[in-house]
Image: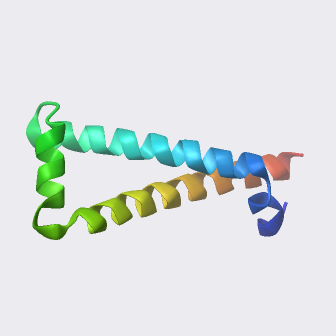
């Protein structure tokens, strides 16, 4: 399966979305626990978004989750295509 064939399937983009969302949630929860030792969500977001960094934080989070989901999904679909 080539690149265009993989990215043109609806299942691929669903996989990108769910893997990215899972990464986003798990990464932030783990980061919160490592930095604060407790589930301090409000403190975490206040520190990350103070001084006008809200847009930067949001873009960074979505970009990281998209790239993670895209790379993992592409690898899964390519491996699956080679087996078939």
Q: Is residue 66 visible?
A: yes
Taking the image as shown, residue 29 lies to the left or right of residue 45, namely right
Quarter of the image with the N terminus is bottom right
Image point (40%, 46%), residue name:
24
Could you say which is closer to the camera, residue 64 or residue 53?
Answer: 53
Residue 9 percent across, percent down from the top left:
79, 54
Q: Quarter-wise, where is residue 54 in the image? A: bottom left
Residue 83 percent across, percent down from the top left:
84, 46
Q: Residue furthest right?
A: 84
Q: Quarter-wise, where is residue 57 in the image? A: bottom left
Image point (55%, 52%), residue name:
69
Taking the image as shown, residue 13 lies to the left or right of residue 69, namely right
Q: Is residue 2 visible?
A: no
Could you say which is closer to the camera, residue 34 or residue 42?
Answer: 42
Residue 50 percent across, percent down from the top left:
12, 61
Image point (83%, 62%), residue name:
5
Q: Quarter-wise, where is residue 52 in the image? A: bottom left
Taking the image as shown, residue 81 lies to the left or right of residue 54, namely right
Could you say which is closer to the camera, residue 78 or residue 49?
Answer: 49
Note whether 67 is above or below 16 in the view shown. below
Residue 11 percent across, percent down from the top left:
74, 46
Q: Residue furthest top?
A: 38
Note whether 72 is above or below 63 in the view shown. above
């Amino acid at each position: 399966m080539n690149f265009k064939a993989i990215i043109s399937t609806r299942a691929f983009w669903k996989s990108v979305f769910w893997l990215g969302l899972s990464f986003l949630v798990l990464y932030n929860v783990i980061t919160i626990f490592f930095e604060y030792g407790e589930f301090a969500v409000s403190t975490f977001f206040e520190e990350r978004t103070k001084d006008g960094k809200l847009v930067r934080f949001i873009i960074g989070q979505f970009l990281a989750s998209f790239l993670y989901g895209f790379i993992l999904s592409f690898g899964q679909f390519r491996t699956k295509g080679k087996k078939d």
